[in-house]
Image: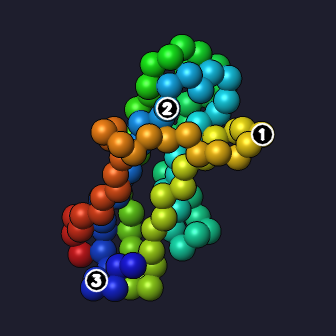
């Protein structure tokens, strides 16, 4: 939460996807209060046909009007198994928030 202060915050997230995902959509979103998309990025179906890892990064600014607000990073793939195929070991995986102004 932004319990300490309202204002403008820089927010971002990064993930490296597993190799060989091929023909599925890969998405990452930053959501406010589990309801509103702030940022979204997608690697479209078929854009990762080979065996190379693909990095995905989101960053932007968010105006926080309430100290009760919070942000969540959501990562998903279009897959019949519903598995999240993101690597965390030795790969770029992170989330950051930094206050920019009041």
Mark 2 and mark 1 lie on one chain; the one further toward the N terminus is 2
Quadrant of the image occupied by residue 3: bottom left
| Residue sitting nearer the eye, 39 or 27 | 27
- Label 2 close to label 1 by CB (< 8 Å): no
Q: Secondary structure at mark 2?
A: loop
| Category of crowding for the residue at label 1, using alpha-carbon neighbours closer than 10 angstroms: few (below 14), some (14–19), many (at least 20) | few
Q: Is residue 52 above or below residue 68?
A: above
Q: Earlier in the sequence, mark 3 or mark 1?
A: 3
Separation of marks 3 and 2 at Cα, in angstroms = 37 Å
Q: Which mark is residue 80?
A: 1
Choose mark 3 or mark 1, whichever is in front. Answer: 1
Per the image, the residue denoted by label 2 is: 18
The answer, for residue 59, to whether it is visible in the render is: no
Q: Position of residue 53 (x, y in %)?
A: 44, 25
x, y (%) of residue 55?
Answer: 40, 32
Mark 3 or mark 2: name the one nearer the start of the chain: 3
């Amino acid at each position: 939460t932004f319990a300490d202060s309202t204002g403008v915050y820089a927010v971002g997230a990064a993930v490296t996807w597993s190799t060989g995902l091929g023909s599925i959509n890969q998405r990452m979103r930053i959501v406010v209060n589990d309801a509103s998309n702030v940022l979204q990025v997608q690697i479209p179906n078929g854009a990762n046909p080979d065996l190379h890892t693909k990095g995905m990064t989101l960053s932007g600014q968010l105006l926080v009007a309430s100290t009760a607000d919070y942000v969540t990073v959501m990562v998903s793939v279009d897959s019949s198994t519903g598995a999240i195929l993101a690597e965390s070991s030795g790969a770029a995986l992170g989330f950051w928030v930094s206050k920019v102004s009041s």
